[in-house]
Structures are given as structure tokens and as C-alpha cells.
Image (cartoon, coloured by chain):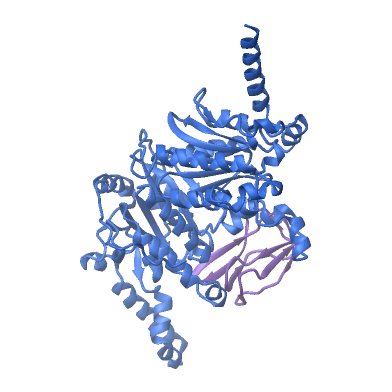
Amino acid sequence: MKEIQSSMAGTVFQVLVGAGDNVAAGQTVLVLESMKMEIPVDAQTDGTVGEIKVAVGDFVNEGDILVVLS
Amino acid sequence: MSQRITNQDRLEETIFKVKQGGQAKYHEKSAEQGKLFVRKRLELLIDKDTFQEDGLFANQSAGDLPADGVVTGTGKIDGRPVCIMANDSTVKAGSWGARTVEKIIRIQETAEKLRIPLLYLVDSAGARITDQLDMFPNRRGAGKIFHNQVRLSGTIPQICLLFGPSAAGGAYIPAFCDIVIMVDGNASMYLGSPRMAEKVIGEKVTLEEMGGARMHCSVSGCGDILAQNEEEAIQKAQQYLGYLPTNFNAAVPKKEPIMPSSDKALKDLIPENQNAPFDMYDAINTLVDGESFFEIKKLFAPELITGLARLDGRPVGIIANQPRVKGGVLFVDSADKAAKFIQLCDAFNIPLLFLADVPGFMIGTKVERAGIIRHGAKLIAAMSSATVPKISVIVRKAYGAGLYAMSGPAFEPDCCIALPTAQIAVMGPEAAVNAVYSNKIQAIEDPKERMAFVQQKHQEYKEEIDIYRLASELIIDDIIDPNDLRGELINRFDYYASKEIVHAPKKHSVYPV
């Protein structure tokens, strides 16, 4: 099980994947909005999306788990 | 006659034996780990037949400590002389005895007198506890090595190639070097080994997790370049030296100009939308000489890019925000990374190019507690104190203290150039309108009317910070077509080469750290 963490504090702007989707390393899975910027969050490894822990509009801190890959 | 033959035999045998290093089993173990023998490393590093060794017979009378576990001497890299100290990990794991330390101190003194770079090829378990009285606390003990490193810093380049461990006190050799190249999987830095950590504080951890090369190059920032193997580490050291003068008073080496590797137009790469991510590496590749970009701390704080490159054959240090990572926002680590890099370039007279696309310094509890103000101050102090030619290019946005950190107009860059996409302001339009009109916006009940009000204020704000207005006020020096940027940078750096700033009469600043 691999976790995708938030790289910085911000608000969830877009969720680009759904549970069960296959993702490849480097693929953008989610976009945060922080400091008025769009911050893409990429998968570090290949995997299948297990759980999405956040919804659009949620505040997340650096290091928070956003998506769990199985 | 027979006496002469005996003397000759003795000399040859002794030299042969010493040059073999430690016992065969240690050579085998090294080879299994993908490590090269110290003399092989030197062969790869320096020009053929240029090595002049010192202290070959150190501790020869001990019998089992050839060269006392360290090879020191002078050689040439790409035709330019350098001094080298290289641990031999086949001799008591490269540990330091009294003569090891003396040899290291002497080669430092040689490098100082000859005013040539010093390379530290580190692969050492640390001090020989059995020899501590002879090498630890005394005036010419190990402490002197670090004292010399600090003293030499900024006068000659000091480079560390870390092939194995650098443990406890030994970990400070890389810490005091200008640049640390670490071999993935083998190099490590730590004050206390995992075994010691378990005994003393009860922590169970692997060496790789606690002090491995990858960790240091991506998390702690103690490492600058992660090499896949020793050959690559050696090549990196050779390339790095190609950008640096032999000492702070010598000329920076120029090479033949090469056209940029990217044939894309910079204009097409920069998105109009200020908030959309773009990859600053693409922009760098359109500006610098082909294959000349030598990145430092690539894996550490990647929201800011630092690296050496050439413009028309002339070395330049680049500090560029990376909007692709964390929006290019400045953090504690990125500020720290830039401060060290600017100091390195300024010390050795390498001009600085700032490519700004920065929403500002990060805000929030997490970074305030980590001392973002203190670390930001460190970056601004380093940039502000640098007296080499400095050009600041506003690629897209430069908001708040981000403008200051990227050598904005108040910090006396030799010029501040804007691309037509540039936007300079205390903050972006969205944040500014919210900050000023928040109460008014809330008071408007009709959503359509509210939206119209916000849009009108955005427009007014954008007009106020219009880049042509800033140029008209002489805040910025020029607005140029992105496709002409390389040519303009080459011209300007060429003129700025004779720049000289006399330092204020004082001992030194009290730098924020």
C-alpha cells in the first residue's frame, strides 16, 4: 500500500482520479490550490487507487495523506 | 654491489606493498559493494601520469597500515592542478590515525600555499579510538582539519566525493565542502551509527534511512549530487571543476559557446495564466549553452532550481523558481538551498542569473514554526551581499518578498528585465482585492453584482501593476521579447564582467542563520 501525501498546505482544488483507477508514476492525481497557485500532486509509483481521503474544498496540511494506492 | 641490490629491492618491495593497500579480503569486500580501490579512483579522476604523491611511507613501520589509510598528493584534472586526499577503506576501514590526520592537514596546507582546489575522496569509518591521544584533542589533531576547511573556504574550491561512510566527526568534512557528491547506496553521513542510536536513544533504524546518500541529497540537504556509481561521481566532480576558477583570484574558465539544446521558442513555453504550472527547466534549456546546465541539489527543495551553466561559454549561476513544484513558492529548504548556492557563486566570481516566477514565501503555521522568516532572511542576506554581476529576469509573477528574494530592483541587480508576461506586486490580484475589499464584497447581497464588483476591482488592480507602467516609472530596466532573452543576457553579462564593488569597512555582517 502506498500513500500519496500533500506536498504543501492548501485547499483541494480538483480530484482527477477515482477509486479503482490505475495510475502511473508521474501522473497527476489531484490538484491543490495554495498561495493562489494550482499545485499538481503526482503519483510517485504505479498503482491502483484504493481510497481518496479528501474532497474538493478540504484544507490539507503538508504531509497529510490524500490518496491511498493499493 | 650486493648491498646496492638489497637497498633497491627493499625500496621496490616496500613501494609495491604500500601501493597494494590493505589485505585481499578487504579488497574483495569493497568490490562486492561496487567500490573501487582508492588508487583506481585516483586513476579515473586525474590526468594520466600527473599524480605526485606525498607521504607514501606514512606509518610504514607499523607493517599493516599502508600509507596510514590515506593517499594524498597533487595531480591534474583537465590540465589544471589540484590537491587530493583519498581514504583507503581497505586499510582499517579508512580510519584515521595520527599520521592519517597529519597527511590530511599537510595536503590542506599545500593546497593553501599553491592556491589550487582540494578534493576530499571520503570513505572512512572515523577515528581510530586506540590512537585518540595522538590524533583527537591536540593542536594538529582532527579538529585542525575542520579548522583548515573553514579557513580555506572561499579561497580555493573544496569538493567532497563521498564513496562510503563519513562517520561522527568525519561527517564534517563534507559539511565544510562547497559541494558534496554522494554515491547512491554506498555513501553515508551520520554522527552516530544505527548501532549507537539503538544503544543510546533506543531508536531502531537502518543506515540508509538515517544517513544514506539518497536521504541526504533529498531530505537533509547535506548532499548536493546523487551519483549512481563511483565513475559517475568522478565525472561529476570533473565537470563541476570546469565551471570554477582555480582560486578566488583566478579567472573563471571560459569554454567554446554552444547553441542551446532546446530549439523551442521561450515565448511559446510560458502560459498566459499566471496560476497555471509550467516547467522552468524548459525555459532554462532555451537560454543556456547546450549541455551546459549542471544542477546542484536537484532532489532537495525542487521548488527552486539552482545550477551552474554557460552563456556564450561564460559560467553563470542560475537561481530559478520552479512553478511545476509547489507552485514555485519559497520554503525553508528552498531559501537555505539558494543562500548556499549564491555564496558559492559569489565566492568564486561566477555571475548570477535569477529567473523569477514566484508567488512569495509560504505562509501558515507549519512554516512559521520552522522559521521561514529566519531562513528567508538568510537567502535575502546572501543575495544582497553578493557583489558579482547579477541579472534578475521576471518571467511571470514576482509577488511579495518573492520579488526581494529573486534580486528585485532594490537589491541592486545590474538590471531587472521583465518579459511581457511579468507581473510585479505585493500580492496577486485575487489576494489583493480580497484583502482590500473583503468587507465591501461581503456586503453586496446580489451574487451577480458581487461578481461584477470583484471583476472590476481585479481589472483596476491589473492596470495599476501593469508592467509597462512599472517600466515607465523606471522600476524595471527593460521589457523584452522572450525570444531575445538569451542574446540580451549574453550582451549584458559581457559588459558587467568588469563590475567591482568595494566592501564597506567592517569586519563582517552578523548574518541571519
Q: The chain drawn blue is chain what?
A: B
Quadrant (top left/top right/bottom left/bottom right) for the N terminus of chain B:
top right
Left or right: B147 with respect to B508?
right
The x and y percentages for residue B338 are 45, 58
Report the label total: 0
Left or right: B37 with respect to B293?
right
Q: Is residue B331 above or below residue B443?
A: above
Q: Colour of chain A?
A: purple
The front one of B73 and B43 is: B73
Left or right: B489 with respect to B153?
left
Q: Residue at x 56, y 49 (%)?
A: B173
The x and y percentages for residue B30 are 72, 36
The x and y percentages for residue B6 are 66, 13
Q: Residue at x 52, y 30 (%)?
A: B46
Examine the rendering and report whether any part of residue B220 can be seen. yes
Most extreme residue toward the top is B1
Examine the rendering and report whether any part of residue B298 can be seen. no
The front one of A60 and A48 is: A60
The x and y percentages for residue A55 are 65, 74
The front one of B499 and B318 is: B499
Q: Is residue B252 above or below residue B458?
A: above
Q: Residue at x 41, y 67 (%)?
A: B402
Q: Residue at x 70, y 49 (%)?
A: B129
